[in-house]
Image (cartoon, rainbow, N blue to C red):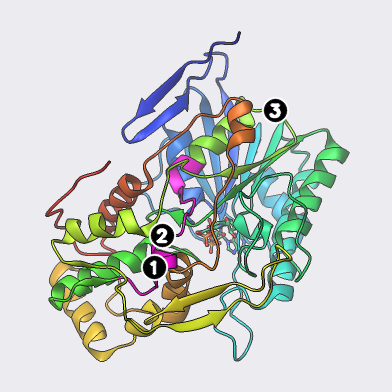
Amino acid sequence: MSIQQVQSSGIYHGLPVYPPDHSGLTAIITGANGISGAYMLRVLAKDPNRWKKIYCLSRRPPLVSGGLPENAEHIPLDFLKDPKEIAGVLKEHHVTADHVFFFSYIQPPPKAGSAGIWSDAEELVRVNSLLVSNFLDALKVASITPKRFMLQTGAKNYGVHLGPTKVPQEESDPRVTLEPNFYYPQEDLVRKFCEETGSGWNVCMPGPILGAVPDAAMNAAFPLAVYCAVSKKLGQPLEFPGDAVSWQMNQSMSSSMMNAYMEEWAVLLGPADQKYNTCDSSAFAWESAWPRIAGWYGIESKGPRDGEEYVGNETGYNPRGYGGKGVTRRKFRVADWAKRDEVRRAWAELAEEHGLTQKELVDVDRVFGFTDGTLCRPAPLNFSMDKSRKLGWHGFVDSTESLLEVFRDLAKIKMIPPVPEVKVSFN
Ligand SMILES: NC(=O)c1ccc[n+]([C@@H]2O[C@H](COP(=O)([O-])OP(=O)(O)OC[C@H]3O[C@@H](n4cnc5c(N)ncnc54)[C@H](OP(=O)(O)O)[C@@H]3O)[C@@H](O)[C@H]2O)c1
């Protein structure tokens, strides 16, 4: 019988207790100002004894109020540059890394005429493979050989962006090759580097990420918070855009903080060369979350009702291979709602009143389009966490509780007005 100790930190439960010999480590976090990397930095910075030095690599610095933690250093780097140039900068700063956490990501604009945020699959592959290959080549030139390289990919690994997939999604599921998928070449590059250098690898795959940063290619929480704040200002109910199927759809949410806790566990305590689903392990559907969210704002929650009319939308593919393509049914898209004059005016007033950073809603199709996809899914996103549980990972957070924490953090960085928290209750 093996005995494991776990601990809680605020709303996060089942977290590992690390043996004291995990100390004096160095880490590289790439993309440390993004929605994933920023939380990796928060988690590693908590224990300066364990993590002696954290190098944050991205073009812009991480935004941390009061400045970066003492054990962290930002080094501006563009991974689309020549690997020798990148290696030169790493050497100049005497960078070492026991562990690498890779979150760099470029989301090219959709193909002309398409609203799908990942519609330019070829360009996604080209630029995101380059980010990884240039960085790996630079590590070699700079003679940096980490013990473990953690690459974060995501649920698109299963083809969930293409249509309905097999459920639950399990790490051993085969690749979906209906379209080019940038995660696969990224993963192959990391595996090859590890074979050649003797490093170990991990791939962690979250679903929709809940996190608070000023800027991210995809952020499920921020547009939702905008929807709540503006609905309240306009005296309107919080109307769910989708039908009863979307309302009840199971989905695995992935809080940035929880992902980072798991990714730290994966490199320090989990076995090498493993791929993991990465999520909150919380039973989540909008049916339970939506009325709670409306309650924080003190507004009426309006779910699907009989007799309403929906516009159906068919998915491009059917990755599971039976039962036809997937269909989502909506009354409206939040991305279209955000373009309404009354919404734009209400947001401008809120921004003025509360000194918010975004005076007007920008890049609405990209920003709100991601939340539309999270609100109405054609099929469940039901990550199996069996594999990581068997290997010793027990982390858990109630996704709705985490969403409120993220809303509060968004308010702290002046992305949204303060959350009124009129009624707060959880299961
Ligand atoms: N967000 C989600 O909901 C979600 C869900 C599931 C999976 N994922 C996956 O998680 C991975 C990380 O995504 P994310 O959402 O954390 O990304 P993100 O928030 O958009 O952050 C991307 C990071 O990459 C950096 N970057 C961009 N271009 C760069 C360049 N040329 N050189 C160096 N750094 C560059 C950015 O900083 P600078 O611009 O300052 O360089 C930023 O720190 C991706 O594979 C994504 O598909 C995300």
**Residue 204: percent from the left, percent from the top?**
62, 45
Q: Relative to the observer, which residue lies in front, 339 or 163?
A: 163
Tell me if label 2 and label 1 are in contact, CB under 8 Å: yes
Q: Residue at x 63, y 50 (%)?
A: 169
Residue assigned mark 2: 248
What residue range appears in magenta?
240-259
Counting from the top left corner in percent of width and height, residue 327 is at: 55, 75
Other-residue count near label 2 (Cα within 10 Å), few / some / many at <14 / 14–19 / ≥20: some
Magenta span contains residue 247: yes
Does the residue tagged 3 have its C-beta within 8 Å of any atom of ligand 1? no
Q: Residue furthest front?
A: 306
**If the image is split into quadrants, where does the C terminus sit?**
top left
Tell me the kind of residue under disc 1: Ala
Q: Is residue 143 magenta?
A: no
Q: Position of residue 199 (x, y in %)?
A: 77, 34
Would you name the residue on which mark 3 appears? 271
Disc marking residue 244 = 1
Q: Identify the residue at horizontal 65%, vertical 78% (top origin).
A: 316
Assign a secondary structure to mark 1: helix
Q: N-terminal of the two: label 3 or label 1?
A: 1
Residue 271 sits above or below residue 328 on the image: above
Residue drawn 75% across the image and 69% down it: 126
Tell me: residue 289, above or below residue 10. Answer: below
Residue type at mark 2? Answer: Gln
Alpha-carbon neighbours of circle 1 within 10 Å: few (<14), some, or many (≥20)?
Answer: some
Q: The N terminus appears in which quarter of the rendering?
A: top right
Give the residue type that dot 3 points to: Pro
